[in-house]
Image (spheres, rainbow, N blue to C red):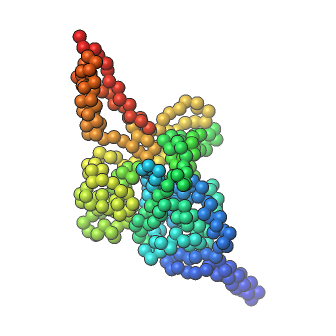
Amino acid sequence: MADVSGLSQFIDQATHESRLRVESDLGDGFVRLRVSEAERRQAKQDIRCVEDAAIEMLRNARDAHARSIFFAASKSGSIRRFTMVDDGDGVPEHLHETVFEPRVTSKLDSLTMDDWGVHGRGMALYSIKANAEEAFIASSAAGQGSSFVVTFDTTKVTERRDQSTLPDLVKALDGVWSVGSSPHNIARTVAEFALANRKKCTVYFGSPVEIAATLLAFGRSSHQSAGMVSFEQVAPSKRLACASDSQQFAQIAAGIGLEMSSRSAHRILQGQIKPLPPYLESLSRRREGDTGTRSSKRAVGRDYRGLKVAQEDVDDFSADLKRAWRELADRYFLEGDVEPAIRISHDSVHVTFPVRKQL
C-alpha cells in the first residue's frame, strides 16, 4: 500500500507540474506555456541575424518529426526570403496564426537541448515573427507537414556579407565529420544542421526553383495518381506532383510559398532543372590535414542558391553580345564575326571576345 500511495503522489505531483506550466490548451496537441515577461522579451533577442532565423526554422521542422526538409533561400534587393517545406506533424488550420504567438508549442514534455541551445519553449516562431517583415504558414496539413515562409529586410536584420561561399565537409583522423572553415553564412548554417541531424532527417537546400524541382521528384516517388484526389488534399511536400501543366505547377508552387514564372515551371516539368541531391551529398569532402581545396559540385555554374543559366538563355545572350560586338568592331577595324566565350562562375558571368584585326 505504501508503494501505491507513493506512486499516486508521484503521478499527482507530475501532473500538477504540467498544469502549472500550461496556461491554456489550444487543442490538437498544442498548448500555451506559462513563460515570464522577461523570457518573452529575451526571445525577441534570440534572432540577431538572418542565419539565426534559418537554424530556428530547421530546428522547428526537426522537432515536428520531419524526415525530409526542403529549404529554399532567395534574395531580391535587401529582402531575404526563406521557404521551408517539410513532411512533419503539420499545423491545424485554426492555429496557423496562433503558433507565431509567444509560448505556443506542441512540445510540452519534450524540451530539446542541441548544439544551438534549448528548444521547445514555444518562443522560436515568435522570435522569428517579431523580427521578420512577414512570417506565415503558406500551407499545412495535420500529420502531413507544413510550408513556412519568412522574409527579412537585411538592412534591419543583417546577414553575412559573403553568401556565395559553400562550406566543405572535413573528416577528422578519428573518423568524425565536421563542417570545414568557411563564412558563417546561410549555406554553412544549413550544412551544420544537416550534419548534426543526419540520422533524424534529410535536408535539401537551394533556390526556390531548384527546391520546386526536388519536391516534384519527391512527390512523384510516392504519389500514385494525381487524378485521384484534389491537390489541396495532398501533403505540401508532395503536392507539386499533382500539376498537369506549367500554369498549374506555378499555381501550386505559389500556394506552398515558392514563387516562380510559368516559364520556370515549364523548364522543371521538361526536366531542364534537375532535382537536388541531399545537401550534404552536394558538398565537397576532404580529410583533416588536406590543404588542397576542392570546390563543391554545386559551385560550378551556380551560386549557393543554385543560380544556373539555361542554355537557351545563354544562346540569346550570346546573340545580343555578337550584335553589339559587330558595331564596335566596325569602328576599330576588327573582325566582327567572332564567337564570344561565356563562362558562368558561382558569383559572376565572364565574357571574352577574341580580338582579330581586319587584313
In this picture, is 288 found above or below 13?
above
* Residue 23 image-quadrant placement: bottom right
Residue 295 coordinates in the image, percent (x, y) = 48, 35
Q: Quadrant of the N terminus?
A: bottom right
Left or right: where does residue 110 sit relative to residue 233?
Answer: right
Q: Residue at x 58, y 76 (%)?
A: 32
Q: Count how many numbered circles sit on residues in the image.
A: 0
The answer to which quarter of the image holds residue 131 is bottom right
**Relative to 289, residue 156 above or below:** below
Task: Residue 66: tell me if it is visible.
Answer: no
- Which of the pair 48/201 is nearer the observer? 48
Residue at x-position 43% and y-position 41%: 303
Q: Residue at x 58, y 71 (%)?
A: 102
Q: Quadrant of the C terminus?
A: top left
Q: Is residue 175 left or right of residue 230?
A: right
The residue most toward the front is: 331
Name the residue: 54% across, 55% down. 156
Is 26 in front, or is 145? 26
x, y percent for residue 95: 47, 74
**Quarter-wise, where is residue 254 in the image?**
bottom left
Q: Whole-percent x and y of residue 356?
A: 29, 16
**Front one among 344 and 158:** 158
Left/right of residue 173 with respect to residue 190 in the rendered view: right
On screen, 211 above or below 136? above
Q: Farthest residue to the right: give it.
A: 2
